[in-house]
Image: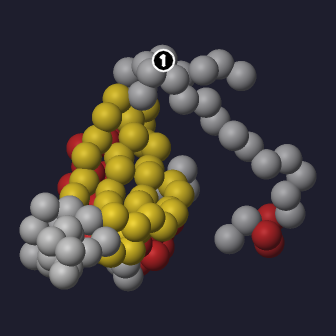
Amino acid sequence: MDIPLHNEMKQITCVLYKGGGTDVLQALHRRGINRCAMWHARGSAVGDPVGRNGLPVPFEKEIICVIVPAKSADEIFHFIFETAQIDRPYGGFLYMEQLKYASPYFFENVPEEDRS
């Protein structure tokens, strides 16, 4: 198995407030994009409400990471931007970076009915 060249794959990362990540993942899966993961984190951002101690109140966030071919990265980036509604207030943020290395991962002997 060959490792794709550094210019063949890109990583798109999306940070959302809690509640929108699952919808984005489902929309990506419907488009056939399956190299993605989501996890939860807690943190604060510029503009978040300030607590009694004068520090921003940390909120739960959902972080989505998607690995995509470089040739379709801009299109998928725009799709995630629209699906996650990044342009609304407190919509989160989105960025893309080139990967130095990426390798495919395949499950062996998975019955067809378990792949959905």
Q: Residue at x 48, y 67 (%)?
A: 40
- Residue 54: x and y in percent read 15, 71
Q: Quadrant of the C terminus?
A: bottom right
2 to 97, vertically: above or below: above
- Residue 11's quadrant in the figure? top left
Residue at point 31% right, 52% down?
76
Colour setting: secondary structure
**Kind of residue at badge 1:** Leu
Of the 4 image quadrants, the one containing the N terminus is top right
Please state the horizontal and vertical placement of residue 107, each as a whole percent of the image.
79, 48
The single residue placed furthest to the right in the displayed view is: 109
- Mark 1, secondary structure of its residue: loop
Write down the residue under mark 1: 5
Q: Residue at x 54, y 50 (%)?
A: 35
Q: Position of residue 32 (x, y in %)?
A: 50, 59
Residue 48 as seen in the image, left or right of residue 32: left
Q: Nearer the viewer, residue 35 or 64?
A: 64
Image check: 72 left or right of 21? left
Viewer-side residue, 46 vs 10 = 46
Near-viewer residue (113 or 22): 22
Residue 102 visible in image: yes
Of residues 113 and 103, which is closer to you in this image? 103
